[in-house]
Image (cartoon, rainbow, N blue to C red):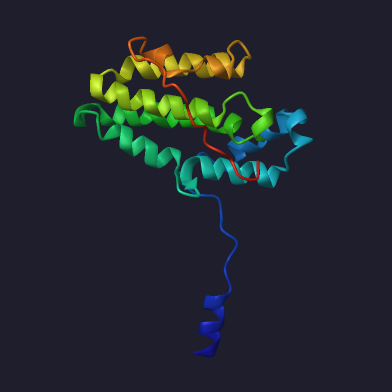
Amino acid sequence: MLTLAACALVQEKPGWPDNIPPRSYYEPHYEADRHNQQYQSQQDYLKWVQRFYAGWGGIDGWHSIREQILADVDAADQEPMRRKLDELGRRISPEWAKRSDQRAIVNKTVQTWINAAYEAGARGDHQRLLEEISADVDALLKDALEPAAITLSRYYPDIEPPAATSDLKNPGK
């Protein structure tokens, strides 16, 4: 009985979550960016990949956001939309997980996409929006678009930008 209690106190090192792309998907992304490696360890990079999906410090992760977005989608369209959102997460997360000052996709950009997705839900406009976001992800990753260009009015010109916006902070990044 004592041995069983002692075993309960020893925590196993957590493995890679099975509900996100495999670690082997992210390692080549990390290895390909020699510049970011000067500022961020692979362990730290992989920690932020996991946080992208799971969330941290009261900030929703991609999985939670995806489910909130899907709540506004008709049942028949949910599975195709889930696949599109999963693919976007797979494309966004390797860049977002880099150290804050080394990445093209920043918190404010992701927050803008989330806000646009909620607006798309109200307008029944998810398909068009996801295509535009996908094109913008490509442009950001190719340095053909500045992160500051990603605003809610980019996707919905009839919405006036707020007077002041708050940016999410990445503690420790």
Near-viewer residue (83 or 163): 163
Q: Residue furthest left?
A: 75
Residue 52 position, x and y percent, is 51, 40
Q: Residue furthest bottom?
A: 1
86 to the left or right of 7: left
Front-most of 111 and 162? 162
23 or 85: which is nearer to us?
Answer: 85
63 vs 144: above or below:
below
What residue do we see at 64% from left, 33% from top? 100
**Looking at the image, residue 152 lies above or below residue 19:** above
How many labels sit on residues? Answer: 0
Is 164 situated left or right of 160 in this image? right
- Establish if 70 lies above or below 104: below
Question: Which residue is pictured at 24% across the width and 29% down the height?
Answer: 73
Q: In the image, residue 156 lies at what x, y percent?
A: 35, 13
Residue 46 in picture, x, y percent from top left: 62, 43
User: Where, by quadrant of the figure, is residue 24 drawn?
Assistant: top right
Residue 71, image quadrant: top left
- Residue projecting furthest to the right: 38
Residue drawn at 54 percent across, 45 percent down:
50
Percent x, y of residue 133: 44, 18
The quadrant in which the C terminus is found is: top right
Tell me if 108 is positioned left or right of 77 in this view: right
